[in-house]
Image: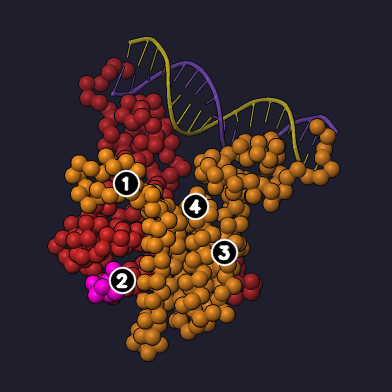
Chain colours: A orange, B red, C yellow, D purple
Amino acid sequence: MPRPSQPLLSRQRIVDVALHIIDSEGLAALSTRRLAAELHVRAPSLYNHFATKEEILDAAADAVISTVDISMFGPHEWPDALREWARGYRAALAQHPHIVPLLAGGPALRPAALRLADAVYGALVDAGWPRGYATRIGATMRYFVFGSTLGSFALGFVDDPAVYAGGQYPHLTDAHRLRQHREQVDEGAFELGLRTLVDGLVRLFDEVAAGALS
Amino acid sequence: MPRPSQPLLSRQRIVDVALHIIDSEGLAALSTRRLAAELHVRAPSLYNHFATKEEILDAAADAVISTVDISMFGPHEWPDALREWARGYRAALAQHPHIVPLLAGGPALRPAALRLADAVYGALVDAGWPRGYATRIGATMRYFVFGSTLGSFALGFVDDPAVYAGGQYPHLTDAHRLRQHREQVDEGAFELGLRTLVDGLVRLFDEVAAGALS
DNA sequence: GTCTATACGCGGATAGAC
DNA sequence: GTCTATCCGCGTATAGAC
């Protein structure tokens, strides 16, 4: 085959297709050969654009983070902004659940992740939170969002009544029905926790502002 | 080598050594050959005790869950029990952070995970929570504990001031110091979130009991 | 400077001897 | 119940075509 006048590959295309494979078949399904095949190319060609497979995964991870809206920080009051941001964050990760364990490593050197961390921390500090609190609040929100997207609670149970019958687990007799109400359960749990958390932070802010805990 | 009168391997020993490898070198370091070598055995011997490597990982995952104390449900009031359980849950997972992504799949058919789910859900229902709330509260707590152990917030940033200087991330100028305060940051964030969550649930319980939201 | 062809070492897993 | 031998697919590296 002659050298194509237009490159067949680009970092963008490689990342897009890699994310597609990960989303539809999981992290384990992404091999360089499989990725190359999807791009109608041989595996070694990928190494002209990325030094390692890990670099490809890193770029895919940051591409997901870059879709998280952070524009509500500034315009909105911090409790509203925090809620809105958390919902969007969760929605973005929920579209790519298989890549969440990779994102768990933190921002490290990835630009979009650093922009996100900067926006959240900055908004809290600008709103009057002491720096130590702003850090811990950012971490807490991150814990909650990541936990809620790492795996579905409802899908953690199997759809077979027999498994939970037999009296071994006396309170789980209806657990096999969780899968059928997946969205209600998972989103409901996230909303319950999110409202509880942010409401509690609003109360804590008043205490801190009053000097009781600063 | 003659067939030994005493088996060289057992499910217990295999699981113990597998966990040790995962804890010290990560999930990726666990190969059947590596595991077998540590047990002074060849890789195929493992298949006399487990059908697949996945089964070994499953057993290791449940072994971790089996160390989580659930004895506080019953004796204690539900808010105290919930806090105490969450702290122990987090501590248990924090000892084996590399296996958390595997546990994220939920209880499925693993006995210890099902006992845990049964205990938490049962305690909440017995305390008077409507079933729908009990489910969502269990899920919310799980989200939070898993998120807090999936990855350290503090270790998500690098220890190099130059990375966060340059004005690109104006609020992260001290982010390189997070690593040095890892425990304060991570545990502080967990405690902040845990107290906020459970305090909020106590308030919600009163509303629900009053019939406002049932 | 982008892609192809090819090779290496290691991964999980199986078959069959003892 | 453990061994040896073996299979296939993986990520990676290099040489060379164009």
* Chain of the residue displaying label 4: A
Give whichever of discs 4 and 1 has the lower sequence position.
Answer: 4
Residue position marked by numbered label 4 in the rendering? A97
Q: Quadrant of the C terminus of chain A?
A: bottom left
As shown in the figure, which amino acid type bears the numbered disc 1?
Answer: His
Whether labels 3 and 1 share one chain:
yes
As shown in the figure, which amino acid type bears the numbered disc 3?
Answer: Val
Looking at the image, residue B172 lies above or below residue C1: below
Horizontal and vertical percent for residue B124? Answer: 23, 62
Q: CA distance from mark 2 to mark 3?
A: 32 Å
Look at the numbered disc 2 and give the secondary structure of its residue. Answer: loop
Q: CA distance from mark 4 to mark 1?
A: 22 Å
Q: Can residue B135 be seen in the rendering of this structure?
A: yes
As shown in the figure, which amino acid type bears the numbered disc 2?
Answer: Leu
Instruction: Tell me, yes or no, whether the highlighted magenta stretch contains residue B213.
Output: yes
* Chain of the residue displaying label 1: A
Residue position marked by numbered label 3 in the rendering? A68
Q: C15 or D3, which is in the foreground?
A: C15
Residue B82 image-quadrant placement: bottom left
Magenta-colored span: B206-214
Q: Residues within 10 Å of mark 3 (few under 14, many from 20)?
A: many
Q: Residue at x 55, y 76 (%)?
A: A73
Give whichever of discs 4 and 3 has the lower sequence position.
Answer: 3
Q: Residue at x 54, y 79 (%)?
A: A76
Whether labels 4 and 1 share one chain:
yes
Look at the numbered disc 3 and give the secondary structure of its residue. Answer: loop
Q: Which mark is residue A176?
A: 1
Whether labels 4 and 3 share one chain:
yes
Q: A167 or A125, which is in the foreground?
A: A167
Q: Which mark is residue B198?
A: none
Give whichever of discs 3 and 1 has the lower sequence position.
Answer: 3
